Structures are given as structure tokens and as C-alpha cells.
Image (cartoon, helix red, strand yellow):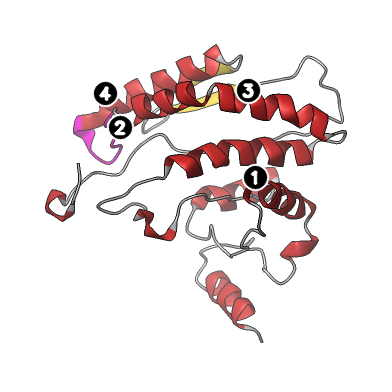
Amino acid sequence: TTLNQFRIEKLKKFGIVNHYLDALHAESLEHLAAARKALKDEWGRPAALIGCGASIPVVESFKTHLGIDSLLVGFARDADSVHSPNEKYDVECYRKGIRSWARIISEFAEERSMTDLHPILSAAEKDFDQSLERLFALCRIPSISTDPAHAADCDRAAAAIVADLSSMGFDAKARPTPGRPMVVAHYTPKDANAKTPHVLFYGHYDVQPADPLELWKSP
């Protein structure tokens, strides 16, 4: 029994996840192979493949209810203190993350060529400053979903995302839930057909509370 197999069996035993991918067999999955190729093309070196997502409930939900596997791609660095005081995110990682997703989606397409990808990467570079400003504007909204005092801020963040996605050609709406609104957006290419790949993006717009403030070294 390998260490990876042991971890997976322990996860199953405690009911954390029923559809956890064994890293030993992940290389045979087409979507992972395509993603790793795209990431290597952008970053110039092989992507690290690690087991993750067991603590993210929606990964299990997507598999159980939709029958699809999730592709989790991270661009943060080890020193970025994710979900902790002094959390940060390198702007260059953000830029290359945008370019990486363009490459990944291109790899998913049935008919692709580098001549098709170049205009997309060029547009991403041209609009990068605007993209960064949209990100900053969203981050300025204190959408702390765990604090009832920020319920209106969560609604404001959802509305901002709907506006952004709508401006890009998506059919976007904020739908009510028992908690905070969920933003749902669809985009269908004009030349879509029965063979057109479907890609589902999932993310969250709420943020972590900044406490404890005394541990922060920068605002």
C-alpha cells in the first residue's frame, strides 16, 4: 500500500470524500494531461500534481450530481499566506494565471492551433490593467459572508460581478439562496454545436475576515 492510497482510504473512511482521485492514475485523465501541457507552455516547466480538494464540498457535489471531475489549478506561492494574516498575491502570478486559463481552455477545444490562441493572449495582455482594476475594486468590498453585519456588502459584491460578467457578453444573474446570493452566468459561442466542450467555472466572491489585526505587518 502506497502513502497516497493510504491517505485516500482514510478520507473515504471518515466520509470526507467518495470521489477522490488517486494521484497514481491521474496522468491517464485527459483533462489533467491537457491542463499540465498548457501550464508547462505558459510557465516553462512541468506543473506539480498534488492531491487536493478533499475539504472543498463542491468538488464532491459536482461529481455526485453532475458526474464531472474538478480541475483545481492554483497560482499562489508558498509564502503568500493564503487565508491567513499578511495574505498577498503576486501580480505576475495573476497575469500568468489569466494566460494559463486561456491556454487550458484552448487545449480542451477539439480544433485548436497556436494561431487561434495568439489573439486571445494578446487581448489578455492589452486588457490586463483593466482586469487588475476590476480585481482591486472587488477586493475593496468587505464581502465577509460569515459576519451578518456585511450582508449588504456580499450583495454589493454579487452585483458587481454580475455587472462585470454582463459587460463581457455573459448572461449573468444573482440568484437568491438561503444564505448570500449566488452568481450564475452562461456564455454560448455563436458557432456552438453538440460537440462544443462545456466548461464550468466555480469560485467564491466572499472574503475571509482580517482578524486578528495585530498579526498583520502591512495593511
Q: Residues within 10 Å of mark 1 (few under 14, many from 20)?
A: few
Q: How far apart are marks 4 and 2 (CA)?
A: 8 Å
Task: Judge depth for marks 1 and 3 and give the one in front.
Answer: 3
Residue placed most toward the observer, 36 or 192: 36
Left or right of 9, for residue 176: left
- Amino acid at circle 1: His
Of helix, strand and loop, which one carries label 1? helix
Q: Mark 3 points at which residue?
A: 123
Mark 3 or mark 1, which is nearer the start of the sequence?
1
* Quadrant location of the N terminus in the rendered image: bottom right
Residue 155 at what x, y percent from top left?
Answer: 34, 23
The correct choice, above or below, for 187 with respect to 117 in the image is: above
Q: Which mark is residue 65?
A: 1
Graded by Cα atoms within 10 Å as few (under 14), some (14 to 19) or many (20 or more), the crowding at tag 3 reads: few
Q: Which amino acid does label 2 sit on?
A: Ser
**Which mark lies nearer to you, 4 or 3?**
3
Residue under pointer 4:
152
In this rendering, does residue 202 appear at all? Answer: no
Disc 4 + disc 1, Cβ < 8 Å: no
The residue range painted magenta reads 141-149
Identify the residue at horizontal 58%, vertical 27% (top origin): 125
Give the SS element for disc 2: loop
Q: What element carries label 4?
A: helix
Nearer the N terminus, badge 3 or badge 2? 3
